[in-house]
Image: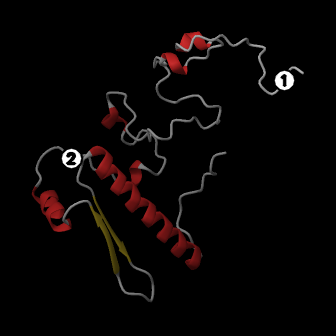
């Protein structure tokens, strides 16, 4: 069962906003860590939280030294993929020209189930399944040498 979609808008209730911030901040830092480890890239996340009646607070995650990453960012003059709130607010077509090659970079490879939950893949429909993943009624197809009848039921025993 999937999670329900929430409308992305500011949370008005202070306590709910605070709890949501903590959970999402921790989730973001975990995803940043995983991205750095899995893809061997340097990752930095910087968050400033300013709440009424509280001091400005800085949260940061960095896979290496934060100062080095910030300096690399400031000095970098190569190609940049910069995104802003409009890229994620549901404005389809706002940045359609950035994805000319047709690849969907925003799809999480770990979440390949479609929204209907029917088990079909969004990606990889053309992939060839390995022999062990194809349905079979014969163990000899798997190299085990014994046949199993389609009517075989291990829960029913002959007395």
Left or right, 135 with reference to 71: right
Picture coordinates of residue 115, whole percent (x, y) = 60, 38
Q: Nearer the viewer, residue 145 or 119?
A: 145
| Residue at the disc numbered 1 | 157
Picture coordinates of residue 42, whole percent (x, y) = 23, 54
Its colouring scheme is secondary structure
- The mark nearer the N terminus, 1 or 2, is 2
Q: Nearer the viewer, residue 93 or 50?
A: 50
Quarter holding the N terminus is top right
Tell me the residue at 84%/24% (across/down). 156
Instruction: Determine the image quadrant of residue 100.
Output: top left
Left or right, 39 with reference to 22: left
Tell me the residue at 31%/69% (across/down). 60
**87 in relation to 115, above or below:** below
Picture coordinates of residue 136, whole percent (x, y) = 62, 14
Q: Nearer the viewer, residue 148 or 117?
A: 148
Picture coordinates of residue 90, whole percent (x, y) = 49, 47
Structural crowding at the residue carrying mark 1, measured as other residues with C-alpha within 10 Å and reported as few (<14), some (14–19) or many (≥20): few
Label drawn at residue 80: 2
Mark whose residue sits in front, 1 or 2: 1
Tell me the residue at 43%/66% (across/down). 25
Secondary structure at badge 1 equals loop
Secondary structure at badge 2 equals loop
């Amino acid at each position: 069962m999937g999670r329900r979609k929430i409308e992305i808008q500011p949370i008005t209730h202070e306590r709910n906003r605070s709890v949501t911030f903590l959970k999402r901040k921790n989730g973001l830092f975990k995803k940043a860590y995983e991205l750095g480890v899995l893809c061997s890239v340097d990752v930095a996340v910087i968050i400033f939280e300013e709440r009424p009646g509280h001091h400005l607070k800085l949260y940061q995650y960095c896979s290496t030294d934060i100062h080095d990453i910030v300096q690399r960012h400031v000095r970098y003059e190569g190609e940049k993929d910069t995104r802003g709130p409009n890229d994620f607010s549901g404005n389809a077509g706002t940045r359609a020209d950035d994805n000319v090659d047709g690849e969907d970079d925003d799809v999480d490879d770990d979440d390949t189930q479609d929204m209907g939950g029917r088990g079909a893949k969004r990606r990889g429909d053309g992939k060839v399944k390995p022999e062990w993943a194809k349905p079979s009624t014969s163990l000899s197809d798997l190299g085990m040498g014994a046949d199993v009848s389609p009517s075989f039921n291990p829960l029913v025993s002959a007395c």
